[in-house]
Amino acid sequence: MDYEQFTEEVWAHYCQHMRSMPWRDDPSLYNVLVSELMLQQTQVPRVLTKFAEFMSVFPTIESLASASLADVLIVWQGLGYNRRAKYLHEAAKYIVANGQPTDIEGLVKLPGVGKNTAGAIMAYVYNQPVAYIETNIRTVYFHHFYPNDANVSDARLLELVAATVDKEHPREWYWALMDYGAFLKSQGMGRLDVSKHYKKQSALKGSVREVRGQILRALVSGDMTLADLKATLDADGRFTPAFDGLLADGLIEHNDGQVHLTK
């Protein structure tokens, strides 16, 4: 498929099926940063609900920066991968202290923001024609350009993304790619195993990650002794690695005989 035909198909789908999202209606740095971190490992429908709740509690980046991590974790409950909440909290504090970053180099200094998330922010907030990759983008390019290939590297894919980005309308182009990719996946055409970097997500049930979430949910209600916390969970041998991991990540604290969310 040539580039012109490809871009025409992407734009045609977008014109008919574009999705409305609050971070698209107002693509400020704060809105996009919150949405991008929430969308890591989480589907759009869940994020739409949680985004609205989060913004009702923390309507500005200043309100998020001044909140306690415990308060942020409480609102974050239900999204999982709670380190993202800590990264977002730390990023807000960094921006309030140092100002709004306006380039890739500045954005990647933010906790939880790698090159691809920084690329998304550059496209959505600043309308810059940068090339970046995420799951839906991979889905679209694999479907159209690598239908029978395997082991396609991101470096190879990035060249193609850069060659086809709409330089006049990069923000809308990436929205179009995201919506088209979501559609392809809904139709069973999202072959992410084509990617050289693809790793199937491990099941939540029976995992240490599951127990991490259970511990945090238990502590939302208030401080607990370690013994009481253990007694509320049916965690087998997963409690210790889950508990130690949360301590190491700075999401919980254990002092004076009590375990609590980090203040």
Image (cartoon, rainbow, N blue to C red):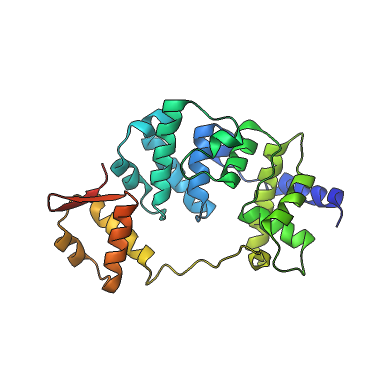
For the point 48% across and 41% down, which residue is it? 34
- The answer to whether 138 is drawn above or below residue 68 in the figure is below
Q: Position of residue 74 (x, y in %)?
A: 31, 47
Q: Residue 165's x, y, as percent?
A: 75, 43
Position above or below: 13 against 198: above
Relative depth, front residue between 85 and 16: 85
245 left or right of 8 in image = left
Assign the N terminus to one quadrant of the image: bottom right
Please provide percent x and percent y for residue 202. 47, 68
Position of residue 175 measured from the top left corner of the image (x, y, whole percent):
66, 44
Look at 58% across and 41% down and name the residue there.
Answer: 118
Image quadrant where one finds the C terminus: top left
Front one among 52 and 195: 195
Q: Does residue 66 show up?
A: yes
Residue 59 seen from this side: no
Q: Which of 200 and 72 lies nearest the eye of the viewer?
A: 200
Q: How many marks?
A: 0
Instruction: Residue at 49%, 46% (x, y): give it.
Output: 37
Residue sitting at the far left: 256
Report whether 29 appears left or right of 144: left
